[in-house]
Image (spheres, grey):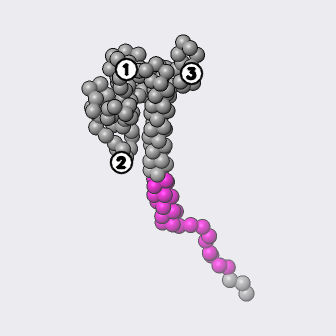
Amino acid sequence: MSVAKNKKTGFTLIELLVVIAILGILATIGLGSFQSSQMKSRDAQRKSDLSQIQKALEMHYNDRGRYRTASEGLPSGEWSDTAGTIYMKTVPTDPKGGSYCYESDDNGTYYKIYAKLENTKDPKIITPGSSVCTAVNGYNYGVSSSNVTP
């Protein structure tokens, strides 16, 4: 004699909801970490850009005896002089499409360059000592010539 077993296979609604909830929580955590990593990566790029511009400005100073003036600002594209010296193949811009703020006097005796870092908890965040590139405009990280502070 054979007894037919009425056994159903599959998942219950509760089990499916629990799995979906767990996947949602994991996705949210992963997405938050990913966005934080992207933000820190862009900030690292900004710091590197300012360092490269700073080196080019120092080479310009060695050749010309002055930094670029406020009216000259930072060039766009290739930065070279009439003698054929190339200071930068391409002057970098902010990774999110913005621009870096450049300040100098009319004699080129100093320079200050500022960027807008996204990570407000970065230990290198500053309040700019500048009349042009202010924290109100979002600039919160800077480098400068050795005779002034950013």
Confirm or deny contact between disc 2 and disc 3 (CB under 8 A).
no
What secondary structure do most residues of the magenta stretch adopt? helix
Judged from this view, the residue extending furthest toward the top is 82
Identified at 41% across, 16% down, the residue is 72
Q: Earlier in the sequence, mark 2 or mark 3?
A: 3
Q: What amino acid is labelled 3 in the image?
A: Ile
Residue density around tag 1, few if under 14, some if 14–19, many if 20 or more, within 10 Å? some
Q: Which residues are magenta?
A: 4-30
Q: Nearer the viewer, mark 1 or mark 2?
A: 1
Residue tagged 2: 123
Residue 55 relative to residue 85: left or right: left
Residue 128 relative to residue 65: left or right: left
- Mark pair 1, 2: CA separation: 30 Å
Which structural element holds mark 1?
Answer: loop
The question of residue 147 being in magenta is answered with no
Vertical placement of 132 versus 23: above or below? above
Identified at 32% across, 20% down, the residue is 105
The quadrant in which residue 46 appears is top left
Which structural element holds mark 3?
Answer: strand
Residue 142 relative to residue 83: left or right: left
Residue 146, disc:
none
Residue density around tag 2, few if under 14, some if 14–19, many if 20 or more, within 10 Å? few
Residue tagged 3: 86
Which structural element holds mark 2?
Answer: loop
Any part of residue 97 in sight: no
Identified at 46% across, 51% down, the residue is 33
Residue tagged 1: 108
Any part of residue 30 in sight: yes
